[in-house]
Amino acid sequence: MTAISAVVIPVAILGVFLYGLAKRVDILDAFTEGARENLSTAVGLLPTLALLMLGVGMFRASGALDALTRAIAPLTDKIGFPAECLPLALLRPVSGSGALALLDGVLKNSGADSFAGRVASVLMGSTETTFYTIAVYFGATKVKKTRHALGSALAGDLTALLLSAVAVRGMMGG
């Protein structure tokens, strides 16, 4: 499989290059125009991403994440969701890198083969950085009204939270 994956990208690039030549497209001009457009999109997204990162940092540094975790823990204990994974579940929709740091903490403190480590791993793999994704994609396309996107995505994240412990318990024992 490694040999195939090492060939796919170069073949795809060569295919695009050959297609452009066949259609008599100025490939260098098309590339630089695309790069210019993408750079302007990235620059336009920077304020939103900076605000999101600042908010996550303030949320964690202020102790609000810990307070929210303590407030919700009795409810999640009743459904069998490990308390060690709750900060990860709360931060994952907002920050991928912050959630990765919390996952690392759960794996180091509880162990990768522990119930909490397995639930955290399933949760990390089955949820999305919802707010980040909405900020980037809707910001890039200049969509102002997200309609039902946020609610639907958060419902998916909540479903992943609820079912991650159930799935781990059902497949590997708890």
Image (tube, helix red, strand yellow):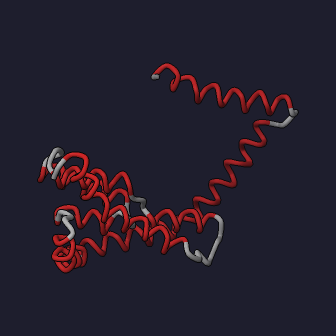
The image quarter containing residue 129 is: bottom left
Instruction: Where is residue 17? Give x, y as percent.
Output: 74, 30
30 shown above or below 82: above
* Viewer-proximal residue among 168 and 55: 168
Q: Residue furthest top?
A: 3
Count the marks: how many?
0
Q: Is residue 80 left or right of residue 52?
A: left
- Name the image quarter holding residue 10: top right
Residues 127 and 96: in front is: 127
**Residue at the location (15% across, 53% down)?**
174
> In which quarter of the view is residue 15 placed?
top right
Residue at 42% across, 59% down: 128
Residue found at x 84% / y 37%: 25
**Lateral position of residue 9 relative to residue 159, left or right:** right
Q: Is residue 173 above or below residue 48?
A: above
Instruction: Give the side of residue 120 with respect to residue 157, left or right.
Output: left
Residue ID at (31%, 64%): 161
**Residue 171 image point, x, y percent:** 25, 47
Find the residue positioned furthest to the front. 170
Residue 71, given in percent of the width and then of the height, sits at: 19, 80
Tell which of 160 and 120 is nearer to you: 160
Most extreme residue toward the right is 24
